[in-house]
Amino acid sequence: MTGEAVYHTRMMRRYGHDWRTGDPFVLIDSEARIGYDSCDQRDADEAETRDQLRFDDAVEMPTKLDALGILPSGDLALVEVKDADGDIDRALEQAAAHAVRYARLMDGRLHETLQEMVDQKAATRVLPPA
């Protein structure tokens, strides 16, 4: 394992399974992807996101989020990981696109789904109890 994967793995372990009270966030999922009912729905979401962020067609839309977490305030934490050789401009594009998409999802039922995920992971001790 090299590069970004090393940092990603360490971060997931430290702020997931090894999370402790007082940490800045708890990570609950890795390589998170948004599911769509159809390709048309996905394409419409992409077009809306591009329009909102004023991305031209040259900007590659991200398909997965490196890590999904929860802040102590209860807000969602969206994490993109880059190593020393990573492209920070690309990280900003990815983070912006994810922020727009997840904000739309939080207007729906996503917050309930995330709570169910946290509860399930705590019950199975994948995450320590809060």
Image (cartoon, rainbow, N blue to C red):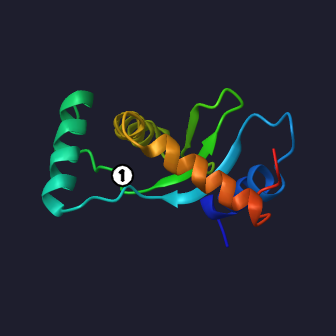
Q: Position of residue 42 (x, y in %)?
A: 21, 54
Question: Measured along the vertical axis of the image, is residue 36 above or below residue 111?
Answer: below
Q: Which residue carries the number 1 mark?
A: 62
Taking the image as shown, residue 73 lies to the left or right of residue 111, namely right
Can residue 1 be seen in the rendering of this structure?
yes
* Residue at (79, 58) in percent of width and height: 17
Q: In the picture shown, does residue 51 fall above or below 14?
A: above
Instruction: Classify 70 as above or below 3.
Output: above
Instruction: Give coordinates of residue 80: x percent, y percent.
Output: 54, 46
> Would residue 82 be visible to someone looking at this image?
no
Instruction: Tell me if 42 is positioned left or right of 117 in this view.
Output: left
Could you tell me which residue is drawn at 77 percent across and 57 percent down?
A: 127
Mark 1 residue type? Pro
> Residue 21 vs residue 108: left or right?
right
Q: Nearer the viewer, residue 120 or 18?
A: 120
User: Which image quadrant: the C terminus?
Assistant: top right
Q: Quadrant of residue 5?
A: bottom right
Q: Residue at x 80, y 63 (%)?
A: 125
Residue 9: percent from left, percent from top: 70, 62
